[in-house]
Amino acid sequence: MNTVRPRQLLVILALMIACAPTGSKAQFIRFAEAPQDWHGSLQTSVSRYRSDYGVELDLVAAVHVADKRYYDKLNAYFAGRDLVLYELVTDGNSTYSTRGMSESGLSVVGWLQATAASLLGLRFQLDEIAYGASNFRHADLSVSELQAIMAAKQENFFTLFVAMASAQLASEQQARIRENLPASSFTTMALLSAVRSEDRSQAVKYLLGKELGRSGSIAIDPAMESQLTLLGDRNEAALSALRDVLEQGQARTISLFYGAAHMAGLERVITGELGFELEERLWLAAWEIP
């Protein structure tokens, strides 16, 4: 793993703030502590639901930078599914890269993700998942659709991320009062201890993983979520694609592969409106630290 310098740490922090998950009482991302200092595991869930008419639907929570073994396990799992509906704001070509997204600002997010993956000794999701598989189907906004929504709301990518950060902060403050939410891992003392440790990269990765797991328990109010373009509008795109598949009735095992931030809103609709009931929740280790 590369040594993380203070300036590079700021890049990683910017990514994590922009892409921090939001959760519900049912977590879709968590952090498991280990007995040794700076050891643990960031884990994401595969939540399985079943309908009265026999359709098996998995919500597969994702983190966009993770260990190669994590993506290998997901690829093997996806190969056995009838259909995988996936998240990716794309320009519509088949390269599955961020190169065609520069005009929308998404290339900045892609660059942050790829940079963070390199600095933390992780892999970038777009480089590892087999999006070209025949059972994969796009279930997200296109770049032009996202731009049209943003224009109608008079938004840009700066205001989008400010809105996300503000919603996260407001939800965290409410959770502190209501649910005695644990404090953030990113204290001044914790960061100083991490950068002074013998293995700075491992310590920083530990703090980031712990914070991502903690923030996954913070629920954004459904009304607030619906107003957030990066959550509400994209969840609507995913659910529209899912409803089309269910109406066609051709797939019996379906996976909805989206970032962990989207899972609470998706679960609320599939259990409250689409008639699915939770059967089990399995956990995959996305980051093993060390």
Image: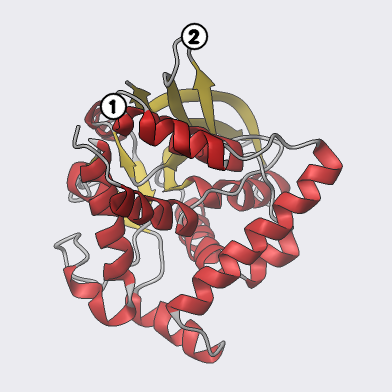
Name the residue located 37 percent from the left edge and 55 percent from the top edge. Answer: 10
Q: CA distance from mark 2 to mark 1?
A: 26 Å
Name the residue located 60 percent from the left edge and 49 percent from the top edge. Answer: 22
Point out residue 5 in the picture as x, y percentages from the top left corner: 27, 45
Point out residue 142 in the picture as x, y percentages from the top left corner: 35, 73
Furthest residue toward left: 95
Q: Is residue 212 visible to us here?
A: yes
For the N terminus, which image quadrant?
Answer: top left
Q: Mark 2 — residue? A: 35
Name the residue located 50 percent from the left edge and 67 percent from the top edge. Answer: 230
Q: Residues within 10 Å of mark 1 (few under 14, many from 20)?
A: few
Quadrant of residue 253 in the image?
top left
Query: Relative to 232, is 87 above or below?
Result: above
Mark earlier in primary sequence (2, 1): 2
Name the residue located 61 percent from the left edge and 35 percent from the top edge. Answer: 27
| Circle 1 SS class | helix
Query: Relative to 41, is 233 above or below?
Result: below
Q: Mark 1 — residue? A: 73
Point out residue 196 in the picture as x, y percentages from the top left corner: 37, 31
Furthest residue toward top: 35
Query: Relative to 111, is 77 above or below?
Result: above
Q: Looking at this view, is 191 or 213 the one in front? A: 191
Query: Relative to 118, is 233 above or below?
Result: below
Q: Which mark is residue 116?
A: none
Mark 2 or 1: the one toward you? 2
Point out residue 131 in the picture as x, y percentages from the top left corner: 22, 49
Looking at numbered disc 1 in the image, what kind of residue is underneath it? Lys
